[in-house]
Amino acid sequence: MACRHRSSTTTLARLAKPARLSPRLTTQPQVQSQVASAVRCFSSSRPSQLKETRCQQGKFTSETYPELKRDPRYGQVTKEHVDYFKGLLGTESAVIDGVTNENATDDIEPFNSDWMRKYRGHCKLVLKPSSTEEVSKILKYCNDNKLAVVPQGGNTGLVGGSVPVFDEIVLNMGRMNNIIEFDEVSGILTVEAGAILEVVDQFLASKGYIFPLDLGAKGSCHIGGNLSTNAGGLRLLRYGSLHGTTLGIEAVLPDGTVVDDLCKLRKNNTGYDIKQLFIGSEGTIGVITKAVIQCPQRPKAQNVALFGLESYEAAQQAFREAKGHLSEILSAFELMDGSSQALVRQVTKKNSPLEGEYPFYCLIETSGSNSDHDGEKLQTFLEDVMEKGIVVDGTLAQDETQVKALWSFREGIPEVLSHLGGVYKYDVSIPLPEMYQLVEDTKARVEEAGLLGDTDEHPVRAVVGYGHMGDANLHLNVSTRRYDERVEKVLEPFVYEWISKRQGSISAEHGLGLAKKKYIGYSRTPTMVGLMKQLKDLYDPNAILNPYKYI
C-alpha cells in the first residue's frame, strides 16, 4: 500500500442518487481535510494484510529466454577482482561475495531476483558503495576489466531491468541514502539516489512539502530508480513527470567519469540539457548518484471520492467534468473496472463502499490550500455529475481512516492479483477514447483460445484493467493460476501490435528492461532506435552497464 498523506474530519457520506440529490448537497456533511502539520503515514512497507503464499524460486532468466547468450567479451569475476572491491569499500557489509564464499548464495538471492519471481540471474557479487567516489572507482575498474554491471535500486520494477541475466555484478545503491539539503523557501531538495521514496516524502511532510511522485512501492523504491525509469505514479496528473521536476543530476559514466550537473535553478538555458538523457535510461549509459528535485508545497485541504459508473463512456465524461469543475485542485483521477474490484473484495473480504456493483469505478482526489474554496468546487462538481446521470452512486471519505480505505480499493489491486498467482502486467499508454478497449479485446482473445475460466484447467483467472485515467495510462493485468507459455503466445505480440496501431506506448511506466526490449519498434521508429544506440555506444562503448536490456 502506498503512503498516502491525507486526512479528513467527519464521517462517511454516501452520495444521493440524482432523484434524491438536494439542490446544493446541503444535507451532506462537509467533506474536507485540514492538514495543519505532517500527518501519519500509512507505509507501503508494512506487512501485507493478505495471507502470504509461498512462491517457488523462479526460473533463471537464461532458461526462460534461451535465445539469450552470455556475451563472451565480458570477463569472469575472480578472487582478484573481489579483493580489489573489498579493499575499496572497506567493510564486509558493503560486499556480498559469492565468488569465494559458497555460503553467500542465500544472501545474494534477493539481489538476483525480482519481486515477482519472474526474473532471476546468476550474480555472485553484490557491491554497495556509500559515495559517488566509490561508484566512480567501481565502474572504472569494471570498465577496464570488462566486467558487466547491473545498477540496482529498490528492485521494484516489472520488466526485469534491475536484476542480472547472467553473472553481472550488482551495484546496489541502498547505502547512498542521505538527504543532503533542503531549501524550505524554494522547496528544492538534494538527495542521494539510494534514498527510499517514502522516507524522503516523510521528511518533506515535516517541512510542509511533498515529493512530486507517489507510487504503490514507495516503501522500498529508490529515488535513483524512480529517475532511471522515469516513474510516473499517482501524482503525475497534478505535478507532471520527473523530466519536469528534476532540476539537476549527478551521475557516473561507465568509465568512471563523474557528471556533476546538480543545478538548483529552474531556469538554465546554457547548452544541451544532458541530465534528461539519464532520466528513463534504466542505468544503461550511467549510474545516477544524486538528484535535485523541485518539490511543491504540501496541500492543506484534501478530498477523496469513489464513484460507480455504468460505462467507460461515462467515466470519460466524468473525467472531462472533473477537469472543468476542479481544474487546479484535481490531483488524481483513477479508473478501475468491475472485475478488478470484484477480485479485491473476494481476496480481502472487504465490503464494497457502494451499495451496488458497477462495470466501472473512478476514484477522485483533490488537493488544495483553501478548504472552503475546494469544498465549494467539489460540491458543484458532484451536483453536476449526479444530475446529468454520469455517476450512478458514490461515497466520500470523511476521515483519515476512510481516505485510506477508499484508496485501498485502487492501490490494493496489484497485491491482490499477485496473491492469486502469476500476473502478466502491461503498463501502457493509449489515447483515452480507446484506452479500455484493449482490456475487452484482450479478454476476448484469451477466451477464444480457451484459456480463461473458473477451473484449474484454465490458466487464466481474469483479465482486468485499471490505472491513471488522468494520464491515459492503463494497467492491463492478466491474472493467472500459473505462468503458461500458451498465455504468453496469445498476449504477445498481440498487445503491442494493438497499441502500435493506435499510436500508443508499450511502456507508460517501468521502462523496457528485458521484457520489452525486443518490442521497442512498436513505439519507436527505426531512426529513434538508431539514435538511442548511438548514445549507448558513445557513453558505454564496452557495453558494461545493464547488458542484454533496453535496446
Image: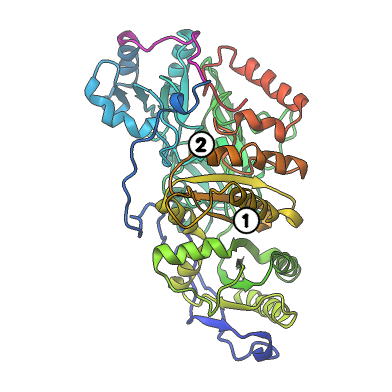
Tell me the residue that label 2 is attached to: 485
Point out the stretch of residues depicted in magenta. 68-80
Between residue 517 and residue 498, name the one nearer to us.
498
Which residue type carries mark 2? Glu
User: Which quadrant of the view contains residue 318?
Assistant: bottom right
Q: Is residue 468 above or below residue 428?
A: below
Which residue type carries mark 1? His
User: Which quadrant of the view contains residue 48?
Assistant: bottom left
Q: Is residue 316 above or below residue 133?
A: below
Q: How is the image coloured?
A: rainbow
Q: Check if residue 77 falls in the magenta segment.
A: yes
Quick check: marks 2 and 1 in contact, CB under 8 Å?
Answer: no
The reply, left or right, for residue 54 in relation to residue 200 is: left
The reply, left or right, for residue 524 in relation to residue 171 is: right
Tell me the residue that label 1 is attached to: 468
The structure residue drawn at horizontal position 68% and vertical position 24%, both measured from the top left corner, is: 532
Q: Residue 514: x percent and y percent?
A: 54, 30
Q: Residue 214: x percent and y percent?
A: 53, 52
Looking at marks 2 and 1 on the same chain, the residue that comes earlier in the sequence is marked by 1
Q: Quadrant of the C terminus?
A: top right
